[in-house]
């Protein structure tokens, strides 16, 4: 996946997460995205979402994992996330 596609997929993940969680879980990461610090944004997003009481949907998690892998982000950021079992609509 090229860098532009990775950024577009990261934007979609962010939009999905902003719809799922209160602003306090996403606003720091959004700030990093706004200044083109994409890797830091995804790492920050994972850290913040790990503290949320509501788990990620499997579809959002899978897309987040794809983005993180494409950016070379350590798997430890994904391992801390809670993921619900079952399905919901894709990102």
Image: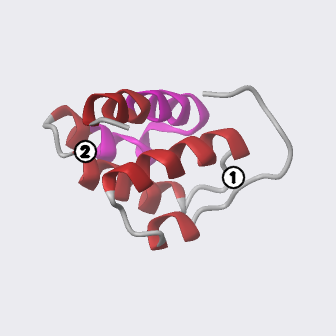
Tell me which corner region of the image, top left, top right, bottom left or bottom right, holds residue 60.
top right
Q: Residue at x 32, y 52 (%)?
A: 71
Q: Indicate left or right for 44 with 83 as reference.
A: left
| Element type where label 2 sits in the image | helix
Q: Indicate left or right for 72 with 50 as reference.
A: left
Query: In front: mark 2 or mark 1?
Result: 2
Give the Cα separation between the discs numbered 2 and 1. 23 Å
Query: Residue 41, labelled with which disc?
Result: none
Q: Residue at x 33, y 60 (%)?
A: 72
- In this picture, which residue range is highlighted in magenta? 11-30
Query: Residue 55, labelled with which disc?
Result: 1
Tell me which corner region of the image, top left, top right, bottom left or bottom right, holds residue 81.
bottom right
Residue 40, x across and y down, in percent: 25, 55
Q: Which part of the image, by quadrant, shows the C terminus?
A: top right
Q: Residue at x 55, y 41 (%)?
A: 63
Answer few, some or many: residues within 10 Å of disc 2's Cα (few below 14, many 20 plus, some between 14 and 19): many
Residue 62, x across and y down, in percent: 61, 47
Residue 39, x across and y down, in percent: 27, 52
Q: Nearer the viewer, residue 1 or 79?
A: 1
Q: Is residue 21 magenta?
A: yes
Q: Nearer the viewer, residue 86 or 53?
A: 86
Q: Which part of the image, by quadrant, shows the N terminus?
A: top left
Residue 4, x across and y down, in percent: 27, 29
Q: Furthest-right residue in view?
A: 86
| Element type where label 1 sits in the image | loop
Q: Is residue 26 magenta?
A: yes
- Residue on which the image places disc 2: 38
Task: Give whichever of discs 2 and 1 has the lower sequence position.
Answer: 2
Answer few, some or many: residues within 10 Å of disc 1's Cα (few below 14, many 20 plus, some between 14 and 19): some
Q: Indicate left or right for 47 with 63 as reference.
A: left
What main secondary structure does the magenta stretch of the protein show? helix
Tell me which corner region of the image, top left, top right, bottom left or bottom right, holds residue 36.
top left
């Amino acid at each position: 996946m090229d860098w532009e596609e990775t950024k577009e997929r990261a934007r979609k993940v962010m939009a999905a997460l902003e719809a799922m969680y209160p602003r306090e879980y996403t606003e720091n990461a959004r700030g990093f995205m706004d200044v083109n610090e994409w890797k830091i944004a995804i790492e920050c997003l994972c850290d913040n979402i790990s503290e949320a009481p509501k788990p990620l949907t499997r579809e959002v998690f899978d897309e987040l994992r794809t983005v993180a892998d494409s950016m070379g982000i350590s798997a430890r950021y994904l391992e801390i996330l809670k993921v619900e079992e079952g399905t919901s609509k894709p990102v």
